[in-house]
Amino acid sequence: MTDERWLDEDAGPIVPAYLLTRGRTVPASEAIDLIAVIITSGGLTPPIGLGPEHLIILQKCTKPTRLVDVAAELNLPIGVVRVLVGDLHAQELVQVELPPPAPDAKVLLEVISGLKAL
């Protein structure tokens, strides 16, 4: 078997996404919602030993950024970004603000009924 499938002439070597997380599929900390807001909470100098993707996430999240937007900007699968952000959250380098809980279905039905009554 040749190494041709792992090489792109324009981009260089292609690394499978699962290698970025060392095969992990579950975040190190709690599960992170797709629309959770991520913001860097560490100091100006990140700790030694972080991968380049971790550093890019820290750089992109200096302003509050949704997890899905981070994944889109990095052009990585959302599952991979969840694990990477989970690593950073476990090290207390980012804060994860969860979205507010969805309203009760009964409240939504009342709102719909009220709108129809208008």
Image (cartoon, rainbow, N blue to C red):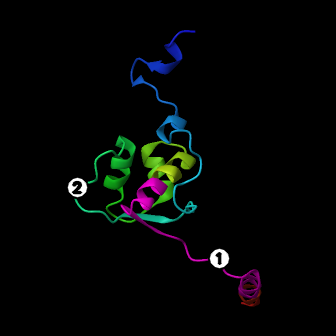
Side (left or right) of 53 relative to 42: right
Side (left or right) of 60 relative to 78: left
Q: Residue 8 in magenta? A: no
Q: Tell me the SS state at disc 1.
A: loop
Q: Residue at x 59, y 47 (%)?
A: 25
Within 10 angstroms of label 1, few (less than 14), some, or many (20 or more) residues? few
Within 10 angstroms of label 2, few (less than 14), some, or many (20 or more) residues? few
What amino acid is found at the position of numbered circle 2 in the picture? Thr
What is the quadrant of the C terminus in the image?
A: bottom right
Side (left or right) of 44 relative to 104: left
Query: Where is mark 1, residue-wise?
Result: 102
Q: Tell me the SS state at disc 2.
A: loop
Q: Which residues are magenta?
A: 85-112
The x, y position of residue 20, in whole percent, is: 47, 39
Name which of mark 2 and mark 1 comes first in the sequence: 2
Q: Residue at x 34, y 54 (%)?
A: 58
The x, y position of residue 56, in whole percent, is: 34, 48
In the rendered image of this protein, does residue 50 appear above or below residue 19? below
In the rendered image of this protein, does residue 111 appear above or below residue 46? below
The x, y position of residue 7, in whole percent, is: 45, 18
Cα separation between marks 2 and 1: 37 Å
Query: Where is mark 2, residue-wise?
Result: 45
Q: Residue at x 30, y 63 (%)?
A: 42
What amino acid is found at the position of numbered circle 1 in the picture? Ala
What is the quadrant of the N terminus in the image?
A: top right
